[in-house]
Image: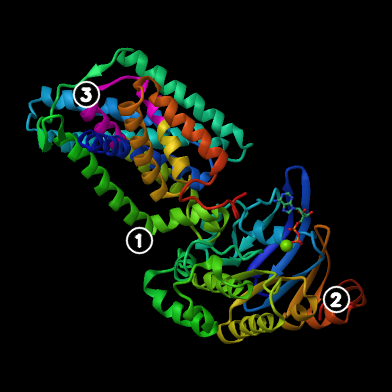
Amino acid sequence: MEYFLQQLINGITLGSIYGLIAIGYTMVYGIIGMINFAHGDVFMVGGFIALIAFLALVAIGVTAIPVALFLVLLIAMALTALYGWAIERIAYRPLRQSFRLAPLISAIGMSIILQNYIQIVQGAGAKPLPRLIEGGHTLIDSEAFAVRLSNIQIIVVLTTFVLMVAFSWLVAKTRLGRDMRACEQDLKMASLVGVNVDRTISLTFLIGAALAAVAGIMYLLYYGVVDFYIGFVAGVKAFTAAVLGGIGSLPGAMLGGILIGLIETFWSAYFTIEYKDVAAFSILIVVLIFLPTGILGRPEVEKV
Amino acid sequence: MTEPLLAIRGVKAFYGNIMALKGVDLDVNDGEIVTLIGANGAGKSTLMMTVFGNPRAREGSITFQGGDITNVPTHEIAHLRIAQAPEGRRIFPRMTVLENLQMGATVSEPGHFEADMKRVCTLFPVLGERLHQRGGTLSGGEQQMLAISRALMSRPRLLLLDEPSLGIAPMLAKQIFRAIRELNERDKLTVFLVEQNAFHALKLAHRGYVIVNGLITLSGSGRELLESPEVRAAYLEGGRH
Ligand SMILES: Nc1ncnc2c1ncn2[C@@H]1O[C@H](COP(=O)(O)OP(=O)(O)O)[C@@H](O)[C@H]1O
Ligand SMILES: [Mg+2]
């Protein structure tokens, strides 16, 4: 029982990170019907920017951890958002009128470029960050097993929760959110009523990338390392999460993220850790076959 | 003669390599109801969309209030206060009626919203009772009323209506035609109306055009067209009256 509880905590933490990335996939798919394969790598770039920002802040003498954390959050979100925005402008927008596969291929190209770029400028090895946030709480302390909830886990889950609430509010209640939903439901009609569709798509990429940056920071804090390849693995899992939850659905992305995090964690805990990625991908296949619209997705009726 | 509110001159538009509009000339004067009638696939909807630059006119010009809008981006055309209730209504299906109306007010001043809401709910009371219902769950007729109301929320100087009577009950169609007349007579709203239901459209309109295969073949006052043998033969006899 204690062991189970511990895995539950770990799974939810990991799932929060996947969920934050999954939002970017699902939003972009919702609006322009395209899988942004480079999104996982944007998350990876976010992790690197956060790492560099941490080290730079320490170098100039900002050592108070809450202050540093807050500054890193701002810096990484802003710079990563810029990446997201630029990718759309350079690699996707020029192809929006061409055949459906074109932007998809361009996205795969963008993903390879980002990975190689980071590998060249940062090296292929894993880059560590000294553990910044120590400590935690022992929830249950039986003789056999102690259930621990670390402070980092609290920060990861809490940050994700706050961002989810803020983001859901943005989509449901603000003018920008309404424009985004209008674009998602009928791009052409949105432009007929006067919505600047290009600008709305840009902002969608910007916000998606900023959320991926937060996921990158959380990953860095949680695991203490980043390398150029984390975007691929985490990206595919977050994409699986988006599909599992129902691609195009925001609560679906979050729910899917948590589920994938839990499945991966429990699989590693009770079966074999070597096959944890296989578990996640098997689920992708099973979902695509038996539940193509995902848990919270809707059947494709009005989408072309 | 003052210059027309909307002037379409020699407009050609394409889907890929297929020419859907083959050099269309058409005027809409301030305060008029102008109707465009024609068979299915003649190019009526294309012309309406071409006014919004989607597809863009590849030849010819479109001017609105004297300004050339041929190459203005679609969303900026909405800002010039041209509004459209397009073919198929295109309600935002997962938004409420209220949100659909808010979308219609995208280019309008926020201060006008309350008054404009009152206005459309007086015009179509059923919408006022359904403000929090999702657009996609409305009946066809209600969706059409919402599409027109959404267009009205921008306080348009020119309203484009693409087949507002298509696929809805005759009773509701009548209500919609009555509303169009009321808007024109009371609020001096200029309307450009596309219809397959030629009889009602020509009775309502001041002037009309007939489009065949991407070309205007006939034009005149509503009455003239109603009495013209070509129109009677092609669009009225045996048609839906
Ligand atoms: N999106 C499109 N892609 C390709 N061809 C189209 C498209 N829309 C309309 N067409 C073609 O353009 C012609 C005019 O269509 P349309 O303007 O819809 O006619 P109408 O509204 O008068 O029924 C038709 O031949 C139609 O098949
Ligand atoms: Mg049509």
Helix, strand or loop at label 2? It is: loop
Q: Amino acid at mark 3?
A: Gly
Residue drawn at 29 percent across, 52 percent down: A165
In the rendered image, residues at marks 1 and 3 fall on the same chain: yes
Using the image as rendered, state which of residue A296 and residue A91 is in the foreground: A296
* Mark 3 lies on residue: A224
Residue for badge 2: B239
Relative horizontal placement of residue B220, taking residue B125 as reference (left or right): right
Which residue is more in the foreground, A56 or B27?
Answer: A56
Residue at image x 25%, y 17%?
A127
| Amino acid type for the residue under numbered disc 2 | Gly
State how far apart marks 1 and 3 are (Cα). 37 Å
On the same chain, marks 3 and 2? The answer is: no
Location of residue A107 with respect to B9 vertically, above or below: above
Q: Is residue A222 magenta?
A: yes
Q: Residue sitting at 57 percent across and 67 percent down?
A: B83
**Front residue of this view, candidates A301 and B108:** A301
Percent across and percent down for residue B29 are 66, 74
A92 left or right, relative to B180: left
- Residue range in magenta is A213-236
Res. B235 in view: yes
Residue bearing mark 1: A173
Identify the image quadrant of residue A135: top left
